[in-house]
Image (cartoon, helix red, strand yellow):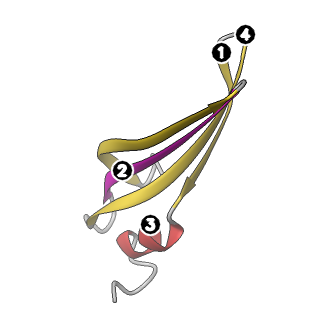
Amino acid sequence: LNQDFENLGSEIHDILIDGETVAIRRTANLRHRGTSKVGSVGIVDFLRFRDGLIIEVSEYPDTATVGKLAGIYDSD
């Protein structure tokens, strides 16, 4: 996402912690660098920690909204 989109800000809705794993549900306001379309995208992030350091990050955005902002899908 960072390559194709400018992040205009995020709002965190939930943070869940289970041992060394953290899940974050958030909404990011993004602008596509090619189309200049702006929109809010729901994203869930999973982070794994070891010895207080992040060792793995997985990001799962709402791909339908990302596709609309990128001009891949119709906006309807």
Q: Label 1 is placed on what type of residue?
A: Leu
Q: Residue, x 32% and y 60% (percent of image)?
A: 40
Location of mark 3 (residue): 66
Disc 1 versus disc 4: distance between alpha carbons? 6 Å
- In the rendered image, residue 64, in percent from the top left (x then y), is placed at 49, 74
Disc 4 versus disc 3: distance between alpha carbons? 34 Å
- In the rendered image, residue 8, in percent from the top left (x then y), is placed at 26, 46
Report the disc number at residue 28: 2
Numbered range of the magenta stretch: 21-32
Q: Do the residues labelled 1 and 3 touch (CB within 8 Å)?
A: no
Disc 4 versus disc 2: distance between alpha carbons? 29 Å
Decide: few, some or many residues near mark 4? Use Cα within 10 Å; few <14, some 14-19, many ≥20: few
Decide: few, some or many residues near mark 3? Use Cα within 10 Å; few <14, some 14-19, many ≥20: many
Q: Residue, x 33% and y 64% (percent of image)?
A: 34
Front label number (1 vs 3): 1
Location of mark 1 (residue): 53
Q: Is residue 20 left or right of residue 38?
A: right
Q: In this view, does 51 lie to the left or right of 32?
A: right
Q: Earlier in the sequence, mark 4 or mark 2?
A: 2
Q: Label 4 is placed on what type of residue?
A: Asp
Q: Residue, x 26% and y 67% (percent of image)?
A: 37
Which secondary structure type mostly characterizes the magenta part of the structure?
strand
Q: Earlier in the sequence, mark 1 or mark 2?
A: 2
Q: How many labels were placed on the picture? A: 4
Q: Residue, x 71% and y 24% (percent of image)?
A: 20
- In the rendered image, residue 56, in percent from the top left (x then y), is placed at 70, 32
Location of mark 4 (residue): 51
Q: Are marks 1 and 4 in contact (CB under 8 Å)?
A: yes
Q: Is residue 42 left or right of residue 9?
A: right
In the rendered structure, does residue 46 fall within the stretch colored magenta?
no
